[in-house]
Image: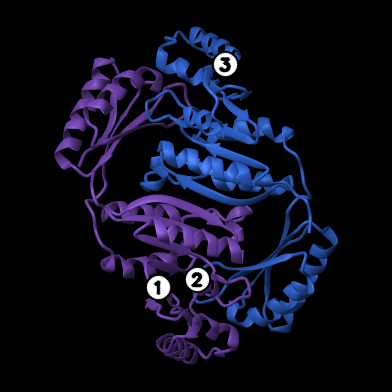
Chain colours: A blue, B purple
Amino acid sequence: MHNNPTAAVLLIGNEILSGRTQDLNLRYIASKLSSIGVRLCECRVISDNRNAIIDALNTLRKSHTYVFTTGGIGPTHDDITAQCVADAFDVPLCQHPEAVRLLSDYFSRRNVEANEARMRMANVPDGGVLIDNPVSVAPGFRIDNVFVMAGVPKIMQSMFENILPALERGAALLSVSVVCNLPEGDLSAPLADLQEKYLSVDLGSYPGKHQTDIPQVALVGRGSDHQKLREVTVALRALVADLGGEVIEVTDV
Amino acid sequence: MHNNPTAAVLLIGNEILSGRTQDLNLRYIASKLSSIGVRLCECRVISDNRNAIIDALNTLRKSHTYVFTTGGIGPTHDDITAQCVADAFDVPLCQHPEAVRLLSDYFSRRNVEANEARMRMANVPDGGVLIDNPVSVAPGFRIDNVFVMAGVPKIMQSMFENILPALERGAALLSVSVVCNLPEGDLSAPLADLQEKYLSVDLGSYPGKHQTDIPQVALVGRGSDHQKLREVTVALRALVADLGGEVIEVTDV
């Protein structure tokens, strides 16, 4: 249908799979990619395990225009992402001269010892290009179609802002939504009819508040065609009115 | 090392990959599984796409003791999970008599039409066993080692509570943590030494507050051996003290 670039996200970290940490990175990356028309097709969450990282990376990088990883690039022993990326690409892990300079300057300004552990953060797979980290200096890197970023959301976001301009763009994935007070079971048939009429728009239905007995359902249309999305918004409003429901909120393009 | 059951989570829904919805199900399931000693090895997030669902399901169910899916079992056209699970297992999708009874009773009590869309929620792959839904009645189901649950967190949680007793248990994954005011770069070497000494405990280091210039790092040990975890807690406290740091918070087993 269209030739939008595609992407996968790879979240690396035992802390997500143990339930310790609530991931916040997927949604951030997903929103940003939608806005520039890169289709996020899948996300995988894996542990800090060498084979798991290499396998997932080699599968995903062959299937998508881009792969974005988060996590595992700090100075401690459980930070093994850079080495695994090097191994996945079958290239050596090398000290990156610019990363060494950035980190050395930063540590000396802050009177912090540039010890072996800290300088490990200057290691990048051969051929990798640095991704700037305005928050805490230690850089991420890009190699081929893989972008390797920190796991701390604030740092990841600052890195992502820096790589955004370099990404190939597709038609932005836009969304419209009509929130109403009808139950999904009443909306289902007319919504399916509407979906058949607008094949270029993905229609979804998302029940909200279950605290009260009043149903609240968001009818969402996603696509890249402004005109079609506007038509869908009008049609969704009409659909709700026809069923005797009330429109609570509308978000149009 | 141990024969703990393993698991994968499969989150199904365009709304997560578009950035519309912040997933809250993974962390909930992860925490519950940790507490009963089921090792969550991976999570995948995919869209409401037939091939994506079937492929992921068939890969994951062969690799793990259990697979838990969330999303796509409501009454609307984009709810295709039940059909996809049936296709993955190569069995027909059938009306489940008990589900029909539950839903019919519920709709008649609430004076809601038991229309075709609503009664679709009684469809279960042949051989599937219902998972009770105390929140909104429409059941999930289990087939073989796959548990199919709703995507709405409150409903998913109530379903998960009902399947928990049926799950095989392993040694609970416990964690201890020592939060301190030292930077990771100082902690790295002694932490790596400690990791070598306690191979049955996974040691991780997680930087926290980046708002201020004072570092805050959580040193976390995960494992199933109470005694070793207690020793690790003592060792982590000593490690922080040796480096001249302060312990801010301790969580022991």
Inspect the image, locate mark 2, and give the three-letter code of the amino acid beneath it: Val
* Residue B168 lies in quadrant: bottom left
Q: CA distance from mark 3 to mark 2?
A: 47 Å
Q: Chain of mark 2?
A: B
Inspect the image, locate mark 3, and give the three-letter code of the amino acid beneath it: His
Q: Nearer the viewer, residue A206 or B71?
A: B71
Residue farthest to the front? A90
Residue B73 image position (x, y, % from top left): 52, 72
Residue shown at 40% from the left, 47% from the top: A17
The residue labelled by disc 2 is B85
Q: Mark 3: give few (<14), some (14-19) or many (20+) Cα within 10 Å.
A: some
The residue labelled by disc 1 is B143
The answer to whether residue A132 is seen in the rendering is yes
Task: Check whether the beta carbons of the residues at disc 3 and disc 2 lie within 8 A of each other.
Answer: no
* Residue A164 lies in quadrant: top right
Does A98 sit left or right of B215 as displayed?
Answer: right
Residue B203 image position (x, y, % from top left): 31, 33
Does A224 sit left or right of A95 as displayed?
Answer: right
Q: CA distance from mark 1 to mark 3?
A: 51 Å
Q: Is residue B173 above or below residue B247?
A: below
| Mark 1: secondary structure | strand
* Labelled disc at residue A96: 3
Residue shown at 71% from the left, 47% from the top: A38
Q: Nearer the viewer, residue B154 or A5?
A: A5
Does B25 sit left or right of A216 as displayed?
Answer: left
Residue A224 image position (x, y, % from top left): 78, 56
